[in-house]
Amino acid sequence: MKIEAVDFFYLTMPIIRDIGDGSQDALLVRIQAGGHEGWGECEASPLVTMAAWNCPMSHSACKPVSASVLGHSLNDPKDIARIHQLVRKQSLDLLQTDHLLSGIDIALWDLMGKKLETPVYRLLGYNQAFPKLPYASQLFGDTPQQTLEKAKAVRANHYRAAKFGWGPYGQGTVEQDHDHVHAAREGLGPDGILLIDAGTVWQDDVEAASQRLKALQECRVTWLEEPFISAALGAYRQLSLKSISVKLAGGEGCHQAHQAFNMMDYAGLGYIQIDTGRVGGISPAFQVAQRAAKQNVNYVNHTFTSYLALSASIQPYAGLESHQICEYPVEATTLARKLTQTSIVPDEDGMITVPEAPGLGLAIDPETIDRYRQEVQIKVNNRIAFESTRR
Amino acid sequence: MKIEAVDFFYLTMPIIRDIGDGSQDALLVRIQAGGHEGWGECEASPLVTMAAWNCPMSHSACKPVSASVLGHSLNDPKDIARIHQLVRKQSLDLLQTDHLLSGIDIALWDLMGKKLETPVYRLLGYNQAFPKLPYASQLFGDTPQQTLEKAKAVRANHYRAAKFGWGPYGQGTVEQDHDHVHAAREGLGPDGILLIDAGTVWQDDVEAASQRLKALQECRVTWLEEPFISAALGAYRQLSLKSISVKLAGGEGCHQAHQAFNMMDYAGLGYIQIDTGRVGGISPAFQVAQRAAKQNVNYVNHTFTSYLALSASIQPYAGLESHQICEYPVEATTLARKLTQTSIVPDEDGMITVPEAPGLGLAIDPETIDRYRQEVQIKVNNRIAFESTRR
């Protein structure tokens, strides 16, 4: 079969707040081929990503991504790998490519799974999808008291693990950060797994990050996430030599598998966190998971949006039994929660598992698309270069 | 003073050919503040980069780049650093940001130089701009015979160094590549510096690249450029251990200083090649140049477009006397050659030097803008999100 149509849906909440909540908008990709359809989601700026689909060619290595996708053959998973090669070659110098390719790759796997009536994780070669332990992923409160209350709520909802991130953390004094982390531990109780996310706040400043280690160690924090930007490999390595019981986590900013390989090889990470909506999709995420398993680094998904994104982010390591921790968004917007007709929710043991249905195992809710859809039109010299799909 | 206006000009040749010639279009950035104006050029997809300027906010770390630039203070070079910090924070998750920031940073330095009546290299702290040895940068011919003729022409034009890249190289057999490299050496004569550019053709395949080393060694090639994608640090390192007399060069794909630091730290490079139009502008390029000088890696500009881009790419290492080789486009389109009112051309000794005039030392030709300008309009829900400037 051939890839007949690729459509984009830009959805957004009526008001976007200036907070670190990535679920306030969404870019959905729908791909149609041979009577089947697949859906994917880019964790990216929707407008800029749409522009990368059909921008004018600049030269042989800066073509629109559509040139390597639309009309191309799609018969088995090897064709997805071939499309990747072609996109990487023809859109090498178009920086936004990787975020766009992510949604396309996810939609291609979903479509392939539906065609072959198989869940994606089986197409990847896993025989079984093991249950994952979801951690409640949320923002710090504005004050330590608010963080305490949020942590108590997480505990009351029976989560065995929780992550607090962004918000005030790293923006004020060492003591303020100390108070937030202690409040989180107090609210979560002594047994909960506590994770802290600094959201790249120290860029590459090892000294600033080091000053926070004492409070993290006192509160038995399992990982400190993204003290630095993804490419600051040397800074990560230096901090990892000081952090002792607190492991470092990072990688959500990686937009290619090789960047994640570099973090595993050189940054001293305990946990590599991959967002399939940014790294180029399920294909490179699976490569990272396989290599993490060999190198004794823990693979973890990065997901802060919909259940579709969650399924796509778990598939690459669904079959790795010992890589058990899983990011689970608990504060997502209505848009993100209603994007699919069904949800992925913790079972009686507090564990989650990817659906057994074909592909990603979730159906998109057309009413959500209608309700939140934004129309985009891009013209170059009065000719339409891109127009968003209405339905 | 405040940054009052930022305007974008998307210029393109009437026909874009499917070849590796990045000078076929251009995205110019003009910034106005306090009665001065500065110009920069992004080495990027113009349409996608324009979309990143004023896309709707997705969340606190995925804002349009305009939010961190327009209306902000600009009084001395420290303000440029502050704008960088803000852009990195507020547009962290917008992948295209770095290519857009490149043109903005260059325009800010040009403006600052004009305001202070000083060439940019002096604002960076250099006392002198040393002459650079330009290498004629061009594509391989389609056949070895064509490559031979191109190399003869370069020699006839008195260039002491030449680079051949892209085109058929690495696409066919080892023997075909052998013939092209030998043809280049024959045409250039025994004394010319010969450089070969593989344009990432082997992705991360060390074995495929290794098979080409013999011909490169036979022809006394100074560097093999971009055998792999920038992030394939391990592949670079492995090849560097085999390449003996042929040094590896790479880095043009880096879109942040840290990526270039990683290539210098882990990839075994002899030459780090930075395009100020991609790496985030003159500011990060200067950081890379300073570190290269300390680490005994040769810094080289990457430039395949206009004299404006050439000036912006040389300024970061203008004062490093021993880093002498310089990429010099000899096959650029009319658009690129006519973008500025004056050119940077080799002197009697075959050397080039950045202009001594303030800023980047070149004036834009308004007729070229008028002749090649494309109009862009981006609408979201029938509201104009971006519109290109007419003049």
Image (spheres, coloured by chain):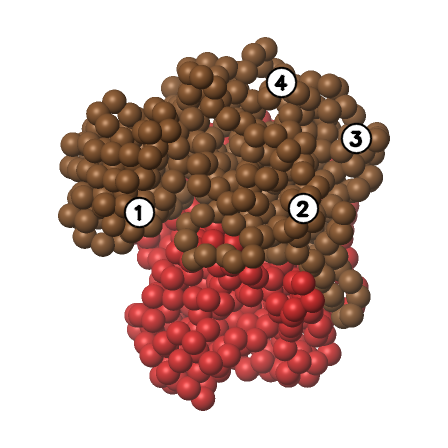
Chain colours: A red, B brown
User: Looking at numbered disc 1 in the image, what kind of residue is underneath it?
Assistant: Gly
Which residue is more in the foreground, A106 or A363? A106
Q: CA distance from mark 1 to mark 3?
A: 44 Å
User: Looking at numbered disc 2 in the image, what kind of residue is underneath it?
Assistant: Ile
Q: Nearer the viewer, mark 4 or mark 1?
A: 1
Q: Which residue is disc 4 drawn over?
A: B356
Q: Earlier in the sequence, mark 3 or mark 2?
A: 3
What chain letter is assigned to the residue under label 1?
B
Which residue is more in the foreground, B241 or A14? B241
Q: Which residue is disc 1 drawn over?
A: B141
Residue located at (76% from left, 51% from top): B390
Element class at badge 3: strand
Q: Which residue is disc 3 drawn over?
A: B36
User: Looking at numbered disc 3 in the image, what kind of residue is underneath it?
Assistant: His
Q: CA distance from mark 3 to mark 4?
A: 18 Å
Which residue is more in the foreground, B141 or B206? B141
Q: Nearer the viewer, mark 4 or mark 2?
A: 2
Q: Earlier in the sequence, mark 4 or mark 1?
A: 1
Element class at badge 4: loop
